[in-house]
Structure formats: structure tokens, C-alpha cells
Amino acid sequence: MLANELGRRGVSVLLADEKDSTAFNPQANATQARTMEHFRRLGFADEIRAQGLPADFPTDIAYFTRYAGHELARFRLPSAQQAKTRARELRGSWSAAELPHRVSQKYVEAELRRQAERLDGVDVRYAHRILNFTEHSDHVITTVEHRHTGERFEVRSHYLMGADGPRSAVRERLGLSYTGETGVQRDFMGGRMFAVYLRCPTFYEQMPHAPAWMNVTFNGDRRAFMAAVDGKGEFAFHTQLRPHEKEDAITEADARGLFCAAVGRDLPVEILSKGGWTAGHSLVADHFRRGRVFLGGDAVHLFTPTGGLGYNTAVEDAVNLGWKLAAVLHGQASPALLDTYEAERRPLALRNTSYARKFADSLGLFTPVAELEQDSAEGAAARAAAGLYLKQHGRAEFNIPGITFGGRYDGSPAIIADGSPAPADAANTYTPTASPGGRPPHFWLQDGSSLYDHFGFGWTLLCLGQPDADTTPFSHAMQRYRGSLTVLHLDDPEVIAGYEVPLVLIRPDQIVAWRGSLADCSDAERIIDRLLCHVLPG
């Protein structure tokens, strides 16, 4: 994602990845709406939405005693096909240029690679690992090795970004460490988990229930969650290991047994890959940067994967850092702008890991009663009670416009506050606001287009309800630094009401940076200097 951001901004990039290619295993499965809006901004949201499940496949979250047993609850969500239509109909909390998309990370990663490799100046090297790096006053020297041939070479760059996962060698070399909770034990989603990427072509034929994207079991024997990968028979199956189950000893036959226990009947299964992992993390690094070296993604925040927040938080790390690096390298912004990366992203990582932990507690600490699977009045009552709880939980975990859209950068030097109060931060509700520091309110314009599609790739100045207003002071102020400013004049009553003031500056990452009146045009140079950190607050 960072290579896509930088390449489109005219910055040359070398991307080294130790893997031979993009991911084979499914990994993350939920692309949130804000991430889809960023894919749209970069020009390939439709390509992402075409990946993964069939266009008409339901993206429901369904809870079962076992997959072939009783259905306990279902939270219904639109298919990819329906999402494109519904996005244009929704208002309020879910007014967005794009709705969420359920797609395995393996498909997203491959598309991001295809997009990056098309860009001039982006050099993608798989099967290459970083051996060492040395920071100097104005550059970094990095030693890279081809994993198969042993060939080594050195790269001189202005900056280095370590997006090298939870065991980040870059983070360790910088002497930085995680803080937060780890090793949290729960009945489910806490402790050792076992992942199985499998193919079961007869699954849907054998199940008495409608298909769902996310399938969760709730019983006292085999708790699991399973995401549909292709909608035809490939699944990412994850189950909680019991104390006596040792992952190193789990054979392919054992893995089939774990899956069939969750199904509640034997089915033919092909194991594509398997391995253990740990749930119960809620970790954020103490710093996201040291000198000319930055960190992002799992290298600085590690989630228990509830709510699908880890991958989406990582994407926004790249979005945030990408435009800032480009602005500094092109001489548009002061190097002090790069200090705002940690100042803005670390609080969001703490916020998002906290939300994920709450979802994991809600699901993992809710335990099944003994009679849940009994064919009796007591069993039926237990299933009804569990269903009520799980339906509420599903809505709480997967209807999250507040988390998706409500992240804010209040207090950042790259934001000029106007004294307006920000809405309360809540997972399941989102109040659109143009208060500086957050996502701009989204509107569908009268011609049917998204407001976001009219924003520039650089900075955007909205001029609302004043078609003849002279905004050239802002254009001239940005031109002093060879920056790009798109001036967008609109007379749409909904947009005017939503933004409340005539002038609004939108950053390249589609965050409201400042808003004010036409009288503020006389102060344009000071405003631009502040936002590009040529002049720091105070």
C-alpha cells in the first residue's frame, strides 16, 4: 500500500519481501469501508471488489452450534453486488463512497502488487530479505540479500520503512518494543489457535443452512470461526486448541478431524496449509519511528483478529505516511511533518486494539452451557438464549461505522483545530462532522457522483455556497512550495449544511485539516505553513 501511495506521488521505491510471492494463506478477510474508500482514491476499488467471493454471495455472519447443527443467529450483510447499489442509498452513519468488502487478504495483496508494479519508479523484489541497515545524517544504507541465490546488494535511500510483521527485525534493531496485553486466556479467541486453509467442495451441498461469509461455532467441544474464501469450497478455518492439543503434533488427518468436529459430520476435506497462532494480543509499539526509519502494520500494532481491524489499521498507516514522505521529499513540507506520523497513528492503534480486545472478550468469554446441543426443552431454551446474545454481539462487532470512519487526529501539528467539539467515539454509531482532524463528511452529489471523487490527489480546498469567491491566496500559498491544490466550488445545500463553513481544506489522505471563512483568505500563507509544518504550533 505504501508503494502504491509513493509511486503515484512520484517517489521511487524499492520493496523487498522475503516471501517468494504474495500470500498463499487467506489471512485477513474483512476490508472495511474506509479502506475501500482509499482503494477508490487510488483508482482500483472496483478491481478489489471483483476479487474473492462471487458477486452475489451473501456476506452474512452466522453462528451455529456446529455448521451442520443448529443455526443460533445471523447478522445479514449485502453481497458485493448489492453493496455497490446500497452505498448510493445510505445516509447518516453509513454515507460512504464505498461499503465494506469481504475478501481474503491473499487476493487484496496480489492486486496491490499488480497495481504497484505498474508504477514508474516502483521496484518490487520478492524472495529478498533485509540483512542490515545503517542510518546516516541524510540517508539510510540497507543491505539486501536474495533468499535463494545469496546475492547481496546495498541500497541508499532517504528513508526506510519496516512493515515486517510482529517479529519485526527492523523494530528490534531500533530497540523498540510492544506495550500492552498479551497472553490473554479466553474460552475462545485467547491462547493458542490452529489455522487450517482447506478445500471442501461438498460443504454447501451438505449444510442445511444458507451460505454465510463468516461461520462461527458455539459449543463446549470445538469452538471455531471460518471465513469463506472463494464461495465455492475453500475456507479459512480457525479453532481454539484445548490444553491437551499440541499443534506440532497435529497431522493432516488430525486437521481434518478438527474441521469435521466443527461441522458435526464427516466430509471429504483437502488440507491446503495449517499452522498455529496466538490470540489474545493487544499490543502497540512504544514508538513508530526512530530517525529516518519508520515502522507500520503488525510491526507496531498486533491485534486479536476480531472486528477485522489489524489489516485496515495497517492500510491507514501507509496512507498517512505516504503523502507526508512525498511532501517532504518533494520539498513541499518541512521534515517536521514526519513527526506527525507517530503522533497521529499511535493513538489510533491504541484505540483500535482496545476495540478489538472488547470484541474478543465479548465472544470469547461467553461460554456455552452443557445442555446447548441437547434435543430437549432445556437445549432449545439454551440455544434461544445463546442466539439472542450472539445476534447482539454480531451487530456490535460487524456494524462498526464509528470505528471505521470515526478515527481522529486531534492535537496533531498537521491539523488546525477550530474549537468545535468532536463527536463521542463509539463503535456502532458515527456522526459525520467537518470538525478538523477527522474524515470529511461524505455526500452523493446531485449528478450521482461521490463528493470524494472530486477531491484532488493532493490538497483540496472546498469553497461552498460562494461561486464567485476569490480563493487565489490559498493557491498562491501552496504554489510557494510547489504543492498541488484542487479548488472545488460547490453550491449543494446538503454539502453546505454538512461542512457548516464556506472554506474547508482537505489533506491528501482525505482528512479535514482546517476550515474557516472567506475572511481567512488573507491568512492563507500562515495556514498552509502550519499544515505543512514549516511553522509549528506554539
Image (cartoon, rainbow, N blue to C red):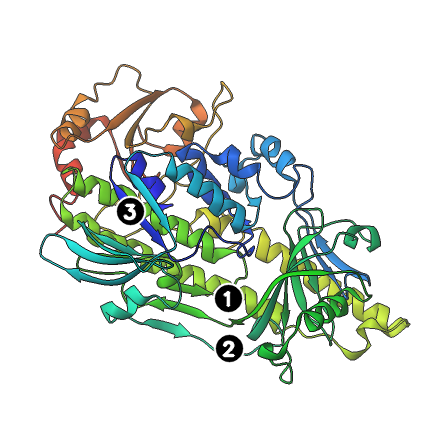
Find out whether the residues at labels 1 and 2 contact each other: C-beta distance under 8 Å: yes
Q: Secondary structure at mark 2?
A: loop
Residue 416, can we see it? no
Q: Is residue 1 above or below residue 270?
A: above
Mark on residue 14?
3
Quarter of the view holding residue 439: top left
Q: Is residue 9 above or below residue 102?
A: above
Mark on residue 55?
none
Residue at the extreme top: 468
Quarter of the view holding residue 266: bottom right
According to the picture, the residue beneath numbered tag 1 turns out to be 304
Mark on residue 184?
2
Residue at the extreme bottom: 244
CA gap, disc 1 to disc 2? 10 Å
Residue 264 x, y percent position in the rendering: 80, 67
Task: Tell me what residue is drawn at x 14 percent, y 29 percent.
Answer: 477
Type of amino acid under label 3: Leu
